Image: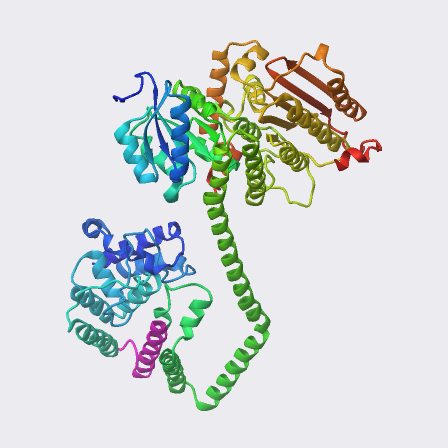
Amino acid sequence: MTSTLAAAQARNLRERPRSPPRDDPEDLGGLRPARPGARACDDDVVDETASVEEVDTVSEAAAPAAPAPAAQPAPFALSRVRRRRQGSVIAGVTGGVADHLGVDVLRVRLVFVLLVAASGAGFLAYAALWLFCPIEPRGVRRELPPNERRQGLGLATLGVGLAFVLSALGGELSGWVTVPLGVVLAGVALVWREADTGTGVAAGATRRARWLGGKLGLVRALAGALLVTAGIAAFLLGNIDLGQVQFGLLAALATLAGVVVLTVPWWLRLVRELGTERTERIRGQARADIAAHLHDSVLQTLALIQKQAGEDASGREVRRLARSQERELRAWLYGPPGGDTGHPAAATDATLAATLAAAAGEVEDDYGVRVAPVVVGDAPLDPDTAALVAAAREAMVNAAKHAGVDEIDVYAEVETETVEIFVRDRGCGFDPAAVPDDRRGLAGSITDRMARHGGKVQLRSTPGAGTEVGLVLPRARRGTPAAATPDSEEETR
Amino acid sequence: MSEPAAPDDAVSVVIVDDHALFRRGVRAELESLARRTVSVVGEAGSVDEAVAVIGHRRPDVVLLDVHMPDGGGAAVLARTRPEHPEVVFLALSVSDAAEDVISVIRAGARGYVTKTISGRELADAVVRVHAGDAVFSPRLAGFVLDAFADRPGATGVVDPELDQLTRRERDVLRLLARGWSYKEIAAELVISVKTVETHVSSVLRKTQSSNRHELTRWASDRRLV
C-alpha cells in the first residue's frame, strides 16, 4: 500500500516541472472529473511490482523537491493526487489518496493510523503528502456520508493516541518529550491548515491577504502559534532549569528582533516590487488585448475597404485614406513596416528601413498608390544612406506619377559590401534610349545624387512591361565617416 | 468531388475566415473574375467549421485566414493536414509580421498573400498553388532571405542542406522580393520557368523544415496578436 504512495509521489515529482504554477482553480473545474479511474489500475500494477521501501522512499524522494511551491494546483496533470477540500479532517490527504487510488477512504485512513502507530512513520508520510500535493480546485462537489468526517476525526485521534501510547510503552520517548511534542504537532497542524485554505487562489497579494484573511483565521493561527510555543516551552522547562530558559528566551527574542529590524528595507522592497510587477503585468495584458482586438477588427476592415473601394476618383481617395490608416496602425502594432522584423526598431534611432518606410508612406499618401517596401537587413542612417533613400523616394515619385499603376514594389537589401534599393513598377515603361526630356531630367537627378555619394543607378525599362530603378551604394568604410557632402536639402526630404 | 455549375477542371476552393464580410468579398471576386478556373465550394467561419467543411468538401485549395479565434489558421492546418495531405493551403492575412508569415508557412501552408491582394492576383495564386508551386509574395521572399541571411552574429549552421540557401536560390528569392514574375526571373537568370519553380519549392521546403534559429524563433514566439 505504502509503496503505492511512494509511486504516486514519485510521479507527482516527475510531473511537477511540466506543470506551470498557474492557479485558476475555477478553470480547472471542468478538468477535475476527467481524472481517469484507469490510473488506479495502473497504480495497482505498480503496487505489486514496486519494492516495499515504503515511507522512507516518500520522504527521500520528496526531499530534493522541497523548495518547489507547495500546494499549487497544476493544470493538465490529470494523475496528480489532489487533496480533498470537502470533508477533510486535517488536510484532505487521505481523501485525495483514496480518490487517486480509487479505494475507500476508510481503508486509506486505517493504513495511515497503523503507520502512525509504527514509530510515527505515518506522521512523516502525511506531512510530506500535505506539503507536496496540491489541494483540489474549489467547486468540486461530492456526496459524502455524514458520519465519514466524524469517523475520520475519531481515527485521527486514535492514530495519534496509539502513537504516543506505543512509543511510551516502548520507552522510546519519555512523557516529558511526548506530551509537548503532541502539543507542538497540534499547533503546527492548526497553522498549516489555516495557511492552506488560502493556497491555490492567487499568488502575490491575494495570497498574502488569504494568509491573514478573516478574524477566525487569525485566531486559529495565533492559537496554533501559542500551542507550538507552549509545547517548546514545556519541553525546555522539563529539561533545563528556569534561569537558563529565561536567558535563552531573551537571547532568542533579541535575535529575532534584530533580524526583523535588519530586514525591514528588504521586506518593503519585496512588497513594492510585487505591486509594481502586478500593475505592469495587468497593463501589458490589457495592451495585448487591445492590439489583438485592433488587429482582428480595424485592420481587417481597412483591408476590406481598400479591396472594395471603386476605381473612380473618390474610390481612390477612400483607398488612400484606408491605406494610410492601415499603415499607421500597423506601425503601432508591429513597429516600422518592412523593417528587419521580429525586433521592431525603436522610434528614436533612425535606420535605413524606418526612413525608407516613412518615404514610402509619404509617396502613398501623396499619390494614392500602394507602395510595399520589403527590407532585408538594416543599417544606421548616415549621409550616404540618407541620400540613397532620397533617391529611392524620387524613383517612387516618378513611378507613381508616370507609370500609371496602383502598386509599386520597393526592395532594399543591406549587405556587408553594398546597400541596394530597387523600385519597380509594372506600368507603361519607356525606352531609355528615347525618353522625353523631363523624364531624362528626373532620372538625371537620381543619377547625379547617387554619383555624389559613390553609388550608381541601373535603369531597366521596357515599354509596356514596366520600369525598375536599381540604386546601388557601396557601404561606407568602417571608421571613416563619409565625406560631409553639403546636401542637407536632400536629407530633409 | 462533383461540383455543380463549374467546369470540372476548375480548382475547388474553401474560404476560411472569421469575417463573413470578407468571405463574401473574396467569393464574389473569385466568382466574377475567375469563374472558369476557380470555383468556391465552401466557406467556414471558425476552426471547427473549417475542419468539418474541409473534411466534407475535400477542396483542392483552402484560403486560410491566419488570425481566428481558437487557434487560427495554424490550428486548422494542424487538424486537417494529417487526414487530408492532398489539400493545399494558401494563407491569407492582414498581418505583415514575420512571425505570422513564417509560422503559418512552417505549419504547412504553401503560400502567403495579404488580404489587400487584387482578385485577379488571388485567383492566379490559387491556380499556382494548386499546380504545386509555392506562392511567395515579395514580402515573404524578404522574410525568408532575412531568416537565411549569413550576417555576423547569426547562429551557426547545423544542417547545411536545410539551413543554407544555394546561391541560385538566393538569386531567385532576391528577384522575387523585387516584385519580379517567374517568367521575368527565368529570362534574367537564363533558366527555364520550371527551374525557377523548383528553386522556389526548394526554398519553401527549407523554410518549413530548417531548424535555423531565426525560423524557429519566429515560429515559436508567435504572439497572440
Q: Residue furthest bottom?
A: A242
Q: In which image quadrant can residue A326 be found? A: top right
Residue A423 at what x, y percent from top left?
Answer: 64, 24
Q: Nearer the viewer, residue B86 or A96?
A: B86
Q: Nearer the viewer, residue A265 or A472?
A: A472
Q: In which image quadrant can residue A482 be found? A: top right
Answer whether residue A410 is visible to the viewer in this image.
yes
Residue drawn 56% across the image and 19% down it: B180
For this view, does A454 lie left or right of residue B60? right
Seen in the picture, residue A264 relative to A48 is either above or below; the reply is below
Residue drawn 29% across the image and 33% down it: B53
For this view, does A459 lie left or right of residue B121? right
Q: Nearer the viewer, residue A40 or A468?
A: A468
Residue drawn 52% across the image and 61% down it: A279
Residue A418 at what x, y percent from top left?
Answer: 70, 25
Q: Which region is colored magenta?
A: A171-194
Seen in the picture, residue B221 relative to A66 is either above or below; the reply is above
Q: Nearer the viewer, residue B75 or A434?
A: A434
